[in-house]
C-alpha cells in the first residue's frame, strides 16, 4: 500500500489515478511515501523521512525546497505544459483584443443605454472610432517555442498569420510539434523588426529578465502589438511605458498588471488569468498523480525538476532504485555489493543530473535488507529502495 498525503485540494480526476486497493490518499496521512501539493509552502515545513517524492500540480515550484529535497534523495516533480492550452487560448484572444479594440468598443456600448431610442443611431455613428486591423496575413513573432509557444504558433498559422519564431534552445519534442510553416528567426532582433505582433512565451530567468529593453523595444515596428502571457519581468516596464505613451507600439496586452500599466491607455491588463481554467487545474492534477504513480510503482522519473529523466523496461521480478551523488565509482560499488550478495542483475540504467545520479537496477533475486543497509553505508549513496 502506498501512502500519498495531499496538502491542498487536488482535482478529483487526479486523485482517481490512485486505485483504492493500492493507495491510501488524504490530507491526514502519516508517514507518507509522497506528497501531492499545489500552492502549499513546504519551504519551512518538516518533510517526513518516509517521503520519497513530492509532486507539484502546476509548473512553478518555488514553494518546494528543491535543494534540500535533492540532498535527501526526494524526487520533485512538476507538470510542465499541463496548462499550455489554457494560456494558448487566452493568447489567441489577446491577439484579437490588441487589434480590434474590442474592450474599448464594449465599454463605449455599455454607456449607450441612457437614450434607448438612440442606441442604433449612436452605434452606427460612433463605431468607426473602434476600427482595428484583422490578424490574417499579418506577421506574428513568437519568442520561446516551448509547450505554449508551439501551440500559439500552430493555431496562428491556422488563422492565416505568417508566423516566425525565435528559440535558441528549442527542444526536439517542440521542434517535432511545430508547424513547418513557422519560419525560424536567427536572432531576436530580426524577429522584432519583422513582426506586426510579438508574443512572449519564454521563462523569466536571470538571463531573460528585461530581455525586451529600450534597444529591443525600439526595433519593433511602429504600431506593432506586444502580447505578454509569460512574465512581466521580461519587459523593461519604464521603457515599455515610454514607447506606449509615444504611440510607437499600438497596444500591450499583459497578464501581469502594475499600477503604471493600469493607468496607460494602450496597455490592457488581465489579472493573471492565463492558466485559470478548470481544465488546466485538472490536467495538472492528473499529470502530477500519474508521475507519482509511475515513480512509486516502477521507479521511473519523468518531469522531475531535480533528478534526471530515467526509465527502464522491466526485465526481472525485482527492482532496486538507488539515488547517489554524482561522483566516480558509484555504479562499480553498487554492482560489487550486489554480486557479493549473490544478486544477479538483468538490466541497469544510470543517469545523472548536476550533482546527483539515479539508478534503476533489475535483479533476479530480491535484494535483502542487509544488502540495502550495506549500500546505504557507501559514501555518496543517499537513498535505496526495493520494489517488486
Ligand atoms: N500567464 C500564466 O498564467 C502562465 C501560465 C503558464 C506559464 N506561464 C509562463 O509561460 C512561460 C512559457 O511556458 P511553457 O509551458 O511554454 O514553458 P516551456 O519551458 O515549455 O517553454 C519555454 C521555452 O522558452 C525557450 N527559451 C528559453 N530562453 C529563451 C530565450 N532567451 N529566447 C527565446 N526562447 C527562450 C525555451 O527553450 C523553451 O522552449 C513560462 O515560463 C511561464 O513563465 C504563464
Image: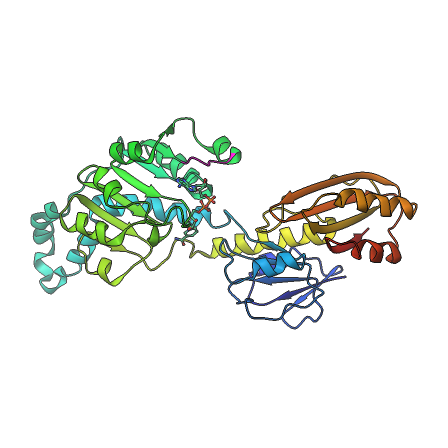
Tell me where the magenta segment starts and ends, as one range: 167-171
Q: Quadrant of the N terminus?
A: bottom right
Q: Is residue 130 at all visible to an observer of this figure?
A: yes
Can residue 187 be found in the magenta stretch?
no
- Tell me which residue sits at (80%, 47%) in the image: 319
Give the overall secondary structure of the magenta segment. Answer: loop
Q: Is residue 300 at all visible to an observer of this figure?
A: no
- Tell me which residue sits at (91%, 46%) in the image: 340
25 in relation to 17, above or below = below
Residue 189, located in which quarter of the rendered image?
top left
Task: Report the side of 72 relative to 201 (left or right).
Answer: right
Q: Position of residue 152 (x, y in %)?
A: 39, 40
* Depth order, front residue of 67/75: 67
Task: Report the side of 332 relative to 301 (left or right).
Answer: right
* The quarter of the picture showing ligand 1: top left
- Tell me which residue sits at (17%, 55%) in the image: 265
Q: Position of residue 327 (x, y in %)?
A: 69, 46
- Tell me which residue sits at (70%, 62%) in the image: 33
Amino acid at each position: 500500500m502506498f501512502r500519498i498525503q495531499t496538502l491542498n485540494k487536488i482535482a478529483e480526476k487526479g486523485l482517481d489515478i490512485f486505485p483504492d486497493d493500492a493507495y491510501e490518499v488524504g490530507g491526514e496521512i502519516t508517514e507518507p511515501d509522497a506528497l501531492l501539493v499545489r500552492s502549499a509552502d513546504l519551504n519551512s515545513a518538516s518533510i517526513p523521512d518516509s517521503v520519497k517524492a513530492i509532486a507539484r500540480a502546476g509548473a512553478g515550484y518555488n514553494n518546494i525546497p528543491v535543494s534540500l529535497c535533492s540532498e535527501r534523495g526526494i524526487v520533485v516533480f512538476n507538470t510542465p505544459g499541463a496548462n499550455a492550452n489554457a494560456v494558448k487560448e487566452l493568447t489567441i484572444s489577446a491577439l484579437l483584443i490588441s487589434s480590434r479594440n474590442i474592450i474599448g468598443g464594449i465599454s463605449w456600448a455599455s454607456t449607450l443605454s441612457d437614450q434607448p431610442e438612440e442606441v442604433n443611431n449612436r452605434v452606427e455613428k460612433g463605431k468607426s472610432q473602434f476600427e482595428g486591423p484583422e490578424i490574417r496575413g499579418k506577421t506574428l513573432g513568437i519568442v520561446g517555442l516551448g509547450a505554449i509557444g508551439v501551440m500559439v504558433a500552430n493555431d496562428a498559422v491556422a488563422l492565416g498569420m505568417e508566423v516566425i519564431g525565435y528559440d535558441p534552445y528549442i527542444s526536439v519534442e517542440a521542434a517535432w510539434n511545430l508547424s513547418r510553416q513557422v519560419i525560424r528567426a536567427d536572432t531576436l532582433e530580426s524577429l522584432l523588426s519583422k513582426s506586426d505582433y510579438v508574443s512572449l512565451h519564454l521563462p523569466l530567468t536571470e538571463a531573460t529578465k528585461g530581455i525586451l529593453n529600450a534597444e529591443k523595444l525600439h526595433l519593433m515596428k511602429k504600431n506593432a502589438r506586444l502580447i505578454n502571457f509569460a512574465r512581466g519581468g521580461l519587459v523593461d516596464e519604464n521603457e515599455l511605458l515610454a514607447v506606449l505613451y509615444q504611440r510607437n507600439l499600438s497596444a500591450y496586452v499583459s497578464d501581469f498588471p502594475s499600477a503604471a500599466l493600469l493607468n496607460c491607455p494602450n496597455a490592457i491588463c488581465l489579472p493573471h488569468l492565463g492558466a485559470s481554467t478548470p481544465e488546466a487545474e485538472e490536467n495538472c492534477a492528473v499529470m502530477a498523480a500519474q508521475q507519482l504513480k509511475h515513480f512509486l510503482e516502477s521507479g521511473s522519473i519523468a518531469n522531475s525538476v531535480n533528478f534526471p529523466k530515467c526509465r527502464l523496461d522491466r526485465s526481472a521480478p525485482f527492482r532496486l532504485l538507488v539515488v547517489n551523488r554524482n561522483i566516480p565509482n558509484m555504479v562499480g560499488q553498487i554492482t560489487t555489493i550486489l554480486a557479493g550478495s549473490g544478486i544477479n542483475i538483468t538490466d541497469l540504467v544510470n543517469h545523472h543530473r548536476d550533482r546527483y545520479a539515479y539508478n534503476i537496477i533489475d535483479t533476479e533475486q530480491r535484494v535483502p535488507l542487509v544488502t540495502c543497509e550495506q549500500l546505504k553505508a557507501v559514501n555518496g549513496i543517499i537513498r535505496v529502495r526495493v520494489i517488486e
